[in-house]
Image: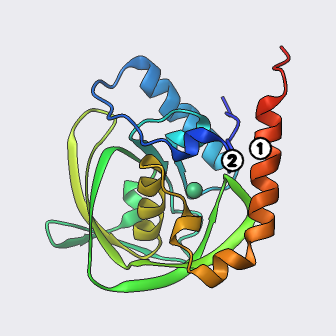
Amino acid sequence: MILPVVKYGHPVLRQKGARVETITPEIKNLIADMFETMHAANGVGLAAQQVGHALQLTVLDVREASKERPSTLEIDGNPEDAGAFMPLVLINPELKPGADFAAGPEGCLSFPEIYADISRPANVDVVALNPKGERIQFRCGGLLARAIQHETDHLNGILFIDRMDRKTKEEFQLELEALQADTKAALKKPKTK
Ligand code: ZN
C-alpha cells in the first residue's frame, strides 16, 4: 500500500524515533508499504517518520541512481557490490562517520522541489538490524553513504535543511515557510472520512 508522505511542517518529522525492539508483523507490513511508497515516488530512501511513525526504521534502494551516482560497500574490509544488498532495510542504525567530507546534491520526499548540495562525511560505518533481527555491519561510500546519513538523520528528527549552509538555507527560506504553512494548515482541517 502506498502511504501518504508527510511534508515539512508536520511535527512527526522532528520526533526522534523509538528503537524497534521486536520485529512484529505490523513492522513487516510497514516495511513493505515503505518500499512501495519509496519506489512509487522514485526515492532513494524513506524514513518511518516520513510516513508518520517515529521509529528507528528506514528503507533504501540506490540501484536506480547507481549509473550517475555510484555507491561503495565493504564488509570486513572486502569490497562488495552495493547493488546486491538492495533493497536495504536498516533498523536501529548506528553510524560512525569517516573524517573526509564530500558535497553532493540532495532532495527529500518531505520537501518537494527543494534540492541543494549538502556536505557530509564521504564514508560511514553502519551497524543495524535487518528485518530478521540479525545484526549487520558494513562501511559504505558514495550515494549510499549520503542516503544512509540523510535517512538516519530523519530517525533522529534531523532534516537536510539543518545540514545546509546558512546561505543555501536563506535562498530557500520563502519556499520553506510556504511549505510549512501549507502543511500546518492541512493538519488543522477537520479530517473527512
Ligand atoms: Zn528526507
The residue lying at 67 percent from left, 55 percent from top is 42
Q: Position of residue 50 (x, y in %)?
A: 59, 43
Residues at circles 2 and 1 in contact by the CB criterion of under 8 Å: yes
Q: Dot 2: within a 10 Å radius of its alpha carbon, few (fewer than 14), some, or many (20 or more) residues?
A: many
Badge 1 local density, few (<14 within 10 Å), some, or many (20+)? some
Is the residue at mark 2 in contact range of ligand 1, meaning its CB lies under 8 Å from it? no
Q: Badge 1 is on which residue?
A: 183
Residue 156 coordinates in the image, percent (x, y):
41, 49
Q: Quadrant of the N terminus?
A: top right
Question: Which residue is most to the top?
Answer: 193
- Tell me if the residue at label 1 has its CB under 8 Å from ligand 1: no
**Residue 165 lies in what quarter of the image?**
bottom right
Secondary element at tag 1: helix
> Can residue 192 be seen?
yes
Q: Which residue is mark 2?
A: 9
Q: Mark 1 or mark 2, which is nearer the start of the sequence?
A: 2
Q: Viewer-proximal residue, 25 or 106?
A: 106
Judging from the image, the colouring scheme is rainbow
Amino acid type, label 2: Gly
Residue 73 visible: no
Residue 145 image-quadrant placement: bottom left
* Residue 124 % position (x, y): 30, 69
- Specify the amino acid type for callout 1: Thr
Residue 35: image location, x then y, percent = 56, 41
